Amino acid sequence: MSDYFGKETPKLGFGLMRLPKNDDGTIDIDQTSEMVDRFLAAGLTYFDTAYVYTGSEEATRKALVERHPRDSYTLATKINARMGCTDEASCKQQFTTSLERTQAGYFDYYLLHALQTSNYRKYDEYHIWDFVREQKEKGLIRHVGFSFHADPKLLDEILTKHPEVDFVQLQLNYADWENPSVTSRANYEMARSHGKSIVVVEPVKGGTLANPPKQVADILKAANPDASLASWAIRYIASLDGIITVLSGMSNVEQMDDNISYMKDFVPMNPDELETIHRAQQALAEIEQVPCTACHYCTPGCPMGIQIPEIFSALNRKLIWSQEDRAREAYDRATKDHATASECLHCGQCESACPQQIPCMSWLERAAEAFD
């Protein structure tokens, strides 16, 4: 591999978006603390949160910052010009609030959050690029980057205009490598052509690749019966050149232990393993499914309050696994106290918010046909 910024960073990062929950829906600080301890004990250091991850920055303070020396880890968080603010002042306030919530003193990595076609101009309108540069000059930010969910043409435009960024955060996984909506491979190649290092998000595609369809699972299990299905996804992406770390949104101690087992002493994939992934990609491409990662960026602005990711999850049970009864049960749960798929107003806000560029309205029509 070539030399690049962040090359020495351990290749597994702890994504703090999907933390374990208590019965009342609050974050389970005790279990999160145990996961943090195991992560650090394994020699892993990179933690990632965001202003818009409900409760995550506060949990980061309690489970990490208040319990471990500041020089024993690196912390990333993000500023979002679309969610959580209404104007320039309220957007910039996110930085101060993140410092207050985490009590981290400074951020090792600070990102402009989820840049895509529908929102990237907001970061110029609110002068956020200049703002984060000023915070870096003050020593409150060590490295500046942005997370990105659009096509390589826009990525090229942004990196050409802002060559000062240290890194880019991209959604990369073997399922989306040639996906024309996510363009993982093309975005990866564009970032590297600009000499930018990459932090990876959604390597397991919202958990989908930890439990892939049987056709895919059979290929992976035949190649290595002892390897977890998630390990194939994470190791594949971590083996690429220019990767700082691969974020895994771990939700329990068991997921943490599994990830540590093969990432503590990370070994890049060999040619036979890469060929196995290629065959898995071919099998996966033949299965129709909604490419939703359940990030829920679409739901806050839905005027009908439709639980879109939950409905898509129910539809995928029908499409991928042919689980008619379980699909119906999942759909009924998603719509018990919320609007049904057929109540969609076709306003389009979900599609403008979706980082996966999913044609949400069309898929809701499919769900309505299947369940309503």
Image (cartoon, rainbow, N blue to C red):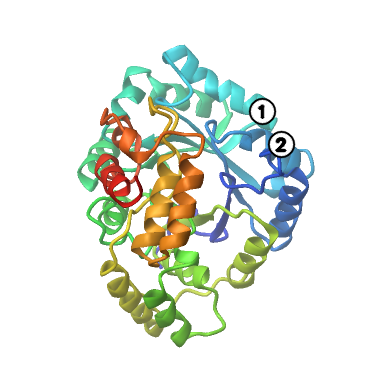
Is 92 above or below relative to 193?
above
Name the amino acid, label 2. Answer: Arg
Residue at 78%, 47% (x, y): give it.
Answer: 30
Residue 173's spot in the image, x, y percent?
39, 61
Name the residue tied to disc 2: 61
Residue 60's spot in the image, x, y percent? 68, 39
241 or 13, which lies in front? 13
C-alpha separation, residue under disc 2 versus residue under disc 1: 7 Å
Question: Is 140 situated above or below 91?
Answer: below
Say whether disc 2 or disc 1 marks the residue closer to the N-terminus. Answer: 2
Element type at mark 2: helix
**In the drawing, does residue 30 fall left or right of residue 143?**
right
* Image-quadrant location for residue 106: top right
The amino acid marked with disc number 1 is Arg
The answer to the question of whether label 2 and label 1 lie on touching residues, with beta carbons closer than 8 A, is yes
251 or 191, which is in the foreground?
251
Q: Can residue 69 be seen in this view?
A: no
Q: Residue 101 carries which label?
A: 1
Quarter of the image holding residue 28?
A: top right
